[in-house]
Image (cartoon, rainbow, N blue to C red):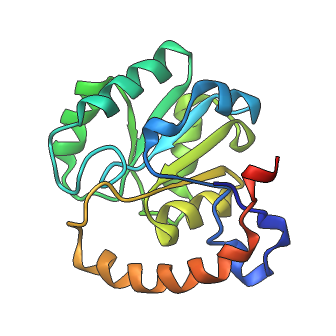
């Protein structure tokens, strides 16, 4: 599902994603390329793996391979404090990672763009949280793709922010694009 971000009230735009998908597996190279996107900045927890997991679901590992085969550049931008886990998953999937001040701050995202040698207009961020991934991406002018969390288990602070996310989503609903009409 897509949103008409420009039609939403200014105060709401910072948290409004360009798209919402159930899983990263729904994102295709062709759809990205149609938007001029050649790079994805990927959140880790509850986007690529369940929270704190060291296991990548097979369908997500296959999706990563399809993206890489299509020439889509990938980089992890995770707020995880477990650097060892991030490094192992980076090596396992052959995806570099950027570190820095946590999202929604822009420094880590800028570092990832520099690592991939792309501009913000050529990149999208994919993540499960409006207040970190989507807000950070919107602050930098990235195309933002909000994904449904993979698993209900998550950090307690995230559980609290999900309450506010639900309130915001009710306000964003009126700016959703009816794709069945197109």
Given the current orientation, which residue lies at the most extreme front position?
A: 180
Is residue 128 left or right of 18 when viewed as pictured? left
* Residue 132 drawn above or below residue 74: below
Q: Residue at x 83, y 66 (%)?
A: 6
Looking at the picture, how far across and down is residue 157, in whole percent?
29, 80
* Residue 27 drawn above or below residue 43: above
Looking at the picture, how far across and down is residue 141, in whole percent?
72, 55
State the quadrant of the N terminus: bottom right
- The image quarter containing residue 56 is top left
Is residue 106 left or right of 179 when viewed as pictured? left
Q: Residue at x 81, y 52 (%)?
A: 181
Looking at the picture, how far across and down is residue 31, in whole percent?
67, 32
Given the current orientation, which residue lies at the most extreme top position?
A: 69
Q: Residue at x 75, y 58 (%)?
A: 178
Q: Residue at x 70, y 38 (%)?
A: 119
- The image quarter containing residue 92 is top left
Is residue 114 left or right of 37 when viewed as pictured? left
Q: Count the marks: how many?
A: 0
* Viewer-side residue, 173 vs 96: 173
């Amino acid at each position: 599902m897509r949103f008409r971000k420009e039609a939403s009230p200014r105060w709401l735009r910072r948290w409004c994603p360009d798209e919402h998908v159930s899983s990263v597996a729904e994102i295709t190279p062709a759809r990205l390329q149609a938007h001029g996107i050649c790079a994805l900045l990927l959140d880790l927890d509850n986007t690529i793996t369940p929270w704190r997991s060291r296991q990548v679901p097979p369908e997500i590992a296959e999706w990563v391979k399809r993206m890489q085969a299509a020439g889509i550049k990938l980089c992890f931008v995770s707020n995880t404090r477990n650097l060892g886990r991030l490094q192992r998953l980076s090596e396992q999937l052959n995806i570099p990672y950027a570190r820095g001040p946590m999202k929604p701050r822009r420094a880590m995202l800028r570092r990832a763009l520099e690592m991939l040698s792309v501009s913000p207009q050529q990149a999208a961020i994919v993540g499960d949280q409006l207040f970190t991934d989507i807000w950070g991406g919107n602050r930098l002018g990235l195309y933002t793709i909000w994904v449904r969390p993979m698993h209900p288990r998550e950090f307690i602070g995230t559980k609290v922010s999900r309450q506010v996310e639900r309130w915001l989503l009710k306000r964003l609903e009126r700016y959703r694009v009816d794709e069945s009409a197109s």
